[in-house]
Image (spheres, rainbow, N blue to C red):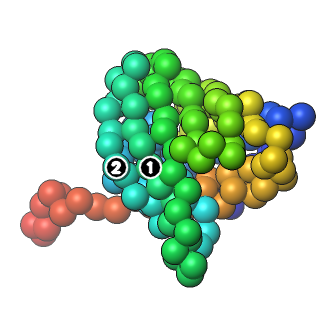
Amino acid sequence: MSESATATVGNTVRLQRVFRAPAERVFKAFVDPDALVRWVPPYGFVGKMHEFECKVGGKYRMSFVNFGKGATHSFTVEFLEIVPNERLRYNDEFDDPNLPGVLEVEVEFSPVMCGTELKIVQSGIPEMIPVEMCYLGWQESLQQLANLVEPEIPDGSESAES
């Protein structure tokens, strides 16, 4: 099992986790819309991508839909910095006016002997969202990310000749 460490300070969450996957694959999961809707929503939610443009200044808009109740929470992400396979920085803003403010997220991808070390800092969490709930949501999302990026699945292009 991959290791995960977390610290919370005020309205900031800091996470660190090692994945058994190359940095290129882990990074791709952060910039591929099909991957994002698979791993970002916490348990009990499905993701829907409404628009996606991966470039500095580009944005994506996504919704989490509560699978059991149908309630929807939408947000928009704006990419501020993209260094492939090394670093992402983006702003995250809820569509709900009752959740004001802009969250800033910094993600660092570092190759390590057994895969990729991922460090995430999410700051600017609105006061009405308990930091502990962000921590729990990230834990679930990172487990789903591990389930997506860690398997080594042959793509069928290898020759089956004996």
| Image coords of residue 142 (percent x, y) | 62, 53
How far apart, in angstroms, are the residues tagged by discs 1 and 2?
A: 6 Å
Q: Residues within 10 Å of mark 2 (few under 14, many from 20)?
A: few
Callout 1, which amino acid? Met
Q: Is residue 59 visible?
A: yes
Numbered label attached to residue 50: 2
Q: Residue at x 63, y 37 (%)?
A: 118
Looking at the image, the residue that sits furthest to the bottom is 68
Numbered label attached to residue 141: none
Q: Is residue 145 visible?
A: no
Marks 1 and 2: CB-CB under 8 Å? yes
Left or right: residue 18 versus residue 144 is right
Residue situated in front as seen by the camera: 158 or 141 = 141
Q: Quadrant of the N terminus?
A: bottom right
Q: Is residue 78 above or below residue 70?
A: above
Q: Quadrant of residue 6?
A: top right
Callout 2, which amino acid? His
Looking at the image, the residue that sits furthest to the front is 97
Helix, strand or loop status at disc 2: strand
Left or right: residue 110 versus residue 58 is right
| Image coords of residue 155 (percent x, y) | 23, 59
Q: Is residue 136 above or below residue 105?
A: below
Residue situated in front as seen by the camera: 152 or 57 = 57
Q: Quadrant of the C terminus?
A: bottom left
| Image coords of residue 48 (percent x, y) | 40, 58
Q: Is residue 60 above or below residue 89?
A: below
Numbered label attached to residue 62: 1
Q: Residue at x 52, y 74 (%)?
A: 70
Badge 1 or badge 2: first in the primary sequence: 2
Looking at the image, the residue that sits furthest to the right is 10
Q: Residue at x 61, y 62 (%)?
A: 42
Q: Quadrant of residue 12?
A: top right
